[in-house]
Amino acid sequence: VEVVDAREANCYIEGKTGEEKCSVCDKVLKENKVIPKLEHKYENNICKNCGRINNAQLDTTYTSKTTNSYPFQVIQFKTPENGKYKFHCENITVWDSYGYLFKEENFNDQVIIDGIEKFNAKKADSGAEIPTLSGYWQRDDEHGKNSAPAITAELEKDKIYYFVVGPYSTATGEFSITITCTHEKTHREGRTLSDCTEGGYTGDVICDTCGKVVEQGQTLEPGEHQEAVLD
């Protein structure tokens, strides 16, 4: 007896029990049956089945991986404020990775399903097309660490975006991803210094977008004015 066309179910595609056939006469002994796809099971916003990350937080580094069963990994992010943000990846293992940034209206599970089908076809036939995802807003494959992707984009407040990491061809591997604010627009708070001879606090530099202290101020004692040399 041999079993053909068997496939495990995952969070995106249905599985198959496989068809049992006699290895001598080729008679079908047991029909192939569909195994329902798995449901996402989240714990601390990470699916225990596939590793998908929901509600990713700023300045938090997540470690994840792609596999033959899950060649594409999804990270969902809701923008807290209007501004420019960076999705920065680092390849922990050596593999050729791609990063895709999707707007909410152009992303759904079918995007990943199509990618998995392309990936499986490429695994079966090296001459098949590269498993590139469709409908993305931006894509990158080299501006992160260790040839990982990194994408910087201007995002809208309360909008949901999806960052997807996947293979260039058929290699899979482990990576980390961190989403950060680029702190492009800032202002100064708490400044009391008005004259060098009086001294005071220079003030903290605060990011307009995320509210983070980008640069801590200094307390200056009363002193002399310093001459600046201008070019």
Image (spheres, rainbow, N blue to C red):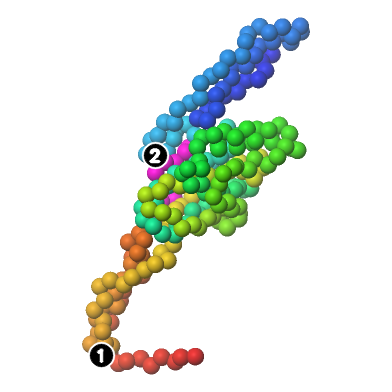
Residue 38 on image: x %, y % = 48, 26
**For residue 45, which numbered disc appears in the image?**
2
- Is residue 124 toward the left or the right of residue 177 in the image? right
Question: What SS does tag 2 mark?
Answer: loop
Q: Give the residue pinned by disc 1.
A: 197
Above or below: residue 201 compared with residue 110? below
Image quadrant of residue 156?
A: bottom left
- Can residue 46 be seen in the rendering of this structure? yes
Name the residue located 26 percent from the left edge and 76 percent from the top edge: 191
Q: Mark 2 is on which residue type?
A: Asn
Residue 21 vertical placement versus 220 (above, below): above
Residue 45 x/y as whole percent:
39, 39
Type of amino acid at the residue the image marks with label 1? Thr
- Front one among 46 and 186: 186
Pointer 1: residues within 10 angstroms few (<14), some, or many (20+)? few
Q: How crowded is the residue under tag 2: few (<14 C-alpha within 10 Å), some, or many (20+)?
A: some
Task: State the count of labels.
Answer: 2
Q: Which mark is residue 225?
A: none
Residue 175 falls inside the magenta stretch:
no
Q: Main secondary structure of the magenta part?
A: loop
Question: As drawn, is 101 to the left or to the right of 42?
Answer: right
- Which residues lie in the magenta part? 51-61
Q: Position of residue 97 (x, y in %)?
A: 60, 47
What residue appears at the point 45 percent right and 27 percent down from the top-left corner? 39
Q: Residue at x 70, y 39 (%)?
A: 129
The N terminus: image quadrant: top right
Determine which quarter of the picture holds residue 198: bottom left
Q: Residue at x 61, y 14 (%)?
A: 32
